[in-house]
Image (tube, rainbow, N blue to C red):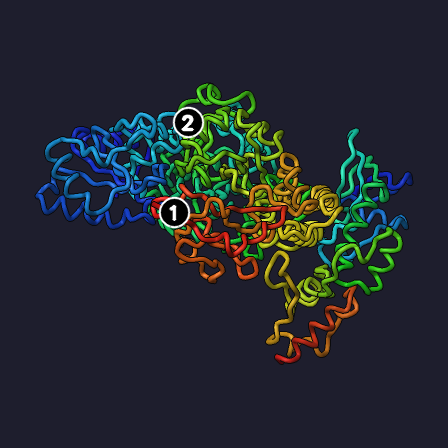
Amino acid sequence: MPQINSPAELEEFRKGILSKRDPNKPCITLCAGSACHASGSGEVAAAIEEEISKQGLSAAVDVRKTGCHGFCERGPIILIHPKEICYLQIEPKDVPEIVSETIKENKVVERLLYTDPGTKEKITHEHEIPFYKNQHRLVFGSNGNIDPKSIDDYLAIGGYAALAKALTGMTAEQVVEEVKKANLRGRGGGGFPAGSKWEGSRNAPGDIKYVIVNADEGDPGAYMDRALLEGNPHCVLEGLIIGGYAIGAHEGYIYVRQEYPLAVENVHSAIRQMEEYGLLGKNILGSGFDFVVKVHQGAGAFVCGESTALMTALEGRAGEPRPKYVRSNVVGLWGRPSVLNNVETWANVPMIINKGADWFTQLGTEKSKGTKIFSLVGKITNTGLVEVPMGMTLRDIIYTIGGGIPGGKKFKAVQTGGPSGGCIPESQLDLQVGFDELTQAGSMMGSGGMIVMDEDTCMVDVARYFMDFLTDESCGKCVPCREGMRQMLKLLTNITQGKGKEGDIELLEELSETAIEAALCALGKSSPNPFLSTLKYFRNEYEAHVKEKRCPALSCKELIAYHIDPKKCQACMACLKKCPVEAIDGGKNRIHVIDQEKCTKCGTCFEVCPPRFGSVQKISGEPVPPPIPEEARTIVRESKQK
Amino acid sequence: MSEILLQIDGKEVKAQAGMTVLEAARSAGINIPTLCFHEKLEPYGGCRLCIVELESRGSTRLVVSCVYPVEKNLVVKTRSEKVDRIRKMVLQLLLAHAPDAFDLQELAQEYGADKNRFEKEASFCIHCGLCVRYCAEVKKKNALGFIDRGIRKEISFIPAIASKECWDCKECFPLCPTEALQAAFVLAKAFF
């Protein structure tokens, strides 16, 4: 096992790895991240191995299973180096053709390429696909090139050079200063400047200090930290050791949720390899600096993403926030100064040390520097993880990278910042993403969740959904959060069920105020956000629900009815056959009628009615027209009249 | 111990470093209402009733006095429009669970809280945690604890411990601001 004892040896070792690798040798990289794994990349991997050995190419081709590439909508993804030919949505049956055509004959398999939806042009290379072309993948980019289980892969792309630079070429103060100058802000939620946090810990009295990775990602639909930790655990660990050196900590923790088994596995394997190489333990790279890392698996509580709750859980107690008027970077884990940063924040650190704060601050807005990874989900054509420079507009993210809203629907809002974030309407689409910009719009950056909603989404129901999530995830310790949200959820549920009363909106506002002013932790204080931000931009929807018992998005079940327009119905029997409760009366040439008493509003008739007829309608806020008289129900077809 | 001078409701108060605002106020005979506070226990900060308004360095902010440490020249207001409004709302929220608890009724009168503001959901427990924390911190027995979280959180005796420890103790019973604790104990007895 090679023990690397100095920066010079590290460089030597890196050169050794590179000298054994032929950049022109064909290499198939396959995304083995969680999303692609779910769409079958495990089977594809097996098929590739089998086919390569069957065609006798085992020595001539490298196969590498990498982390998430981000374009999860089109997974499993494979890239064939050195030409970087990108194939999407690969199935095991495609593999023989890929091997015999692309690997052996150097020919591109057209049908597996990305097709531009506008120009219908085939695109061969990953970086030319619009989804990737407009991104700036500084943190996330290496994911697709390295095997997360191979420290040599990370070293080959320049890994641990920043660590060597920091430990042997910079003082701890200089490291803190560089991070401060880079204005790196916390990627996990609050956007607190990491450098100031580090400085506070560095200056706090005490010999024992800690650095902690917050990998308790819990926002519904968000998985950027997961993908980073699964795909490139070394860059997070490198950042963590640099942070430890900067503040004077010799122990680091990774708090990762146990629902992320691959992340847990890859982090453990990374730590093991680092120990073998001497990149963790005593006297790292001959610098005299000692550092160890422990992994703690969280039991799956959303509130444990809150810093004090996370530290309480690390101490082995129930993860509840503690009332703090002293910052945890001064009095944190076991009462010691502790710096807690999110996965993505740590992953930015090596880059800042390598390339410098001046380089880092070239990207971004005045107060938000660098890039941010967003998890783009919901009603969006290109679901996936995207990394963009701070300051890109929401419109560019959603339309240029995300490909817009599928099914010709209209955009309605984008929810950012997780459950305690907020919804941003169409009128604000030109907003530049940044910590302060999103906060001003009534939402927040959070950890980077971005849920796109189309015109069929009811904003009151969205607020109810997130409130339901938060009441479940509140720790239940303080009254404004536990009891306030209990009442808010009841009120919102009533409103979506048409039981809203005059004064409900005002009561919700009052409860929100109490939570903001009096709740114990950040989760509690931000818990009314789903309500407040939807009220801010969609008050008319709330009022329609309460006053007119009408759901403008035609989504709230209790407030809508399905009706078949007799003028449009062609008596095709599609809905009649599919109705699960036999609520539709009709027959051949007999206009169909829905029995409102029997109807369960499942929406099946609406979905199966052929679009060219479009006779099933949703109505809300007005009475259902009476069924047409029996004698008018027979359809007389023109062709049969002759 | 160094002495710290601060002002509470216009009155000069001398406090020791390390004291909380609540302790300083009570030592000067100024009352701040609490539900989850007990002098033998670590401050919990759960009920939020002891919230007060601080004036410090030219701005005002709300803090809970049972946790906030005294500082030199701090100006504390234990009643204000904001403070009273929050206390009223906290009480109304709790009254939905324990509408007839004496402690709550008394406070409700003081702050004009309407016990019918929210739909009743009589679970009696208001989650002050006094029983749980007293058993853990003072008696060191952990015969009861909180189970679940969020709106499903409740107190529960652990029969294996409670059956041995509780008969001769019951010191937590008088701490309960509602009658929930006794009820929970009666229920737990079924498993002894």
Instruction: Characterize the local packing of mark 2: few (<14), some (14-19) or many (20 or more) Cα atoms within 10 angstroms.
Output: some
Residue A277 visible to an observer of this rendering: no
In the orientation shown, which residue stands out farthest toward the left?
Answer: A56
Residue on which disc 1 sits: A637
Judging from the image, mark 1 belongs to the subunit labelled A
Instruction: Please tell me whether residue A17 is drawn above or below residue A597 in the rendered image.
Output: above
Mark closer to the chain start, 2 or 1: 2
Along the viewing direction, whichever of A193 and A442 lies nearer the viewer = A442
Residue at 64 percent across and 67 percent down: it is: B142
Crowd rating for badge 1 (residues with CA inside 10 Å; few <14, some 14–19, many 20+): few
* Picture quadrant where residue A287 is located: top left
Residue situated in front as seen by the camera: A21 or A2: A21
**Residue positioned 43% across, 35% down in the render:** A408
Going by the numbered disc 2, the residue's amino acid type is: Thr
Q: Is residue A525 left or right of residue A245?
A: right
- Is residue A212 toward the left or the right of residue A146 in the image? right
Placement of the C terminus of chain A among the 4 image quadrants: top left
Q: Which residue is mark 2?
A: A400
Q: Amino acid at mark 1?
A: Arg
Chain letter for mark 2: A
Q: Nearer the viewer, residue A108 or A347?
A: A108
Q: Position of residue A112 (x, y in %)?
A: 23, 36
Q: Quadrant of the N terminus of chain A?
A: top left
How far apart are the alpha carbons under marks 2 and 1? 48 Å
Coordinates of residue A96 in the picture (x, y in percent):
14, 43
Element type where label 1 sits in the image? loop
What is the x, y in percent for residue B24? 83, 47
On screen, residue B84 versus residue A297, left or right, reads right
Mark 2: which secondary structure?
Answer: helix
Give the number of the disc on residue A141.
Answer: none
Residue B157 is situated, as x and y percent measured from the top left of the image, at: 64, 71
